[in-house]
Amino acid sequence: MNSGDDTGTAGERRRLGALEAEVLDLLLASREPLIPGEVLRRLDDTLAYSTVVTVLSRMHDKGLLTRGKRGRAYAYAPVADSHGLTARRMRRELESDPDRAAVLSRFVESLSAGDEALLRRLLAGELAGEPSGNPSDVPPGSTA
């Protein structure tokens, strides 16, 4: 990829998707918001500065990042931790289908018994004080 504007082919779009994931991981690991130059340095890549700015701007437009002015540049940070971002993607998918009941029904049908039990307990408010992860009475192999 030679410039930030070369996004026309499928291969380049896949590269941007991979780059977005890499940038998101970098920002999730950072203790503070980063400006594009800091992102570029931490990527240790041969990307153009304009490519990094474009990726950060697109991620902001998608609602993945917040930004605030720092000097002459914007500093970017994730809107949520990795679990929160996954939950946002799940909600966006749910909202994209007009038949929410059908989507939720199919989702619950596809869950393992352990995940279904965990979801029922979450909906009942039984796990409110427990840390996220794998509570002790959730069957092994289920995912939180």
Image: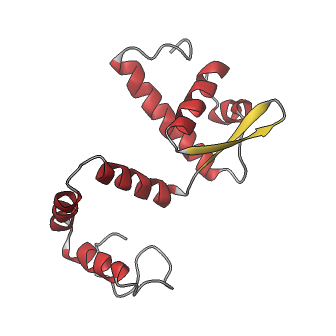
Q: Residue at x 37, y 71 (%)?
A: 144
Q: Is residue 133 left or right of residue 43?
A: left
Residue 47 in view here: no
Residue 2 in view here: yes
Question: Picture quarter containing residue 115?
Answer: bottom left
Indicate the position of residue 99 as horizontal and vertical percent values: 19, 54
Q: Compared with residue 14, is residue 59 higher up or lower down, i.e. above or below?
A: below
Q: Residue at x 71, y 46 (%)?
A: 33
Q: Compared with residue 143, is residue 93 higher up or lower down, i.e. above or below?
A: above
Indicate the position of residue 83 as horizontal and vertical percent values: 47, 60
Q: Compared with residue 99, is residue 49 higher up or lower down, i.e. above or below?
A: above
How many numbered discs sit on the rendered protein? 0
As rendered, which of 135 and 118 lies closer to the eye? 118
Indicate the position of residue 142 as horizontal and vertical percent values: 29, 72
As rendered, which of 92 and 50 lies closer to the eye? 92
Which colour scheme appears in the figure? secondary structure
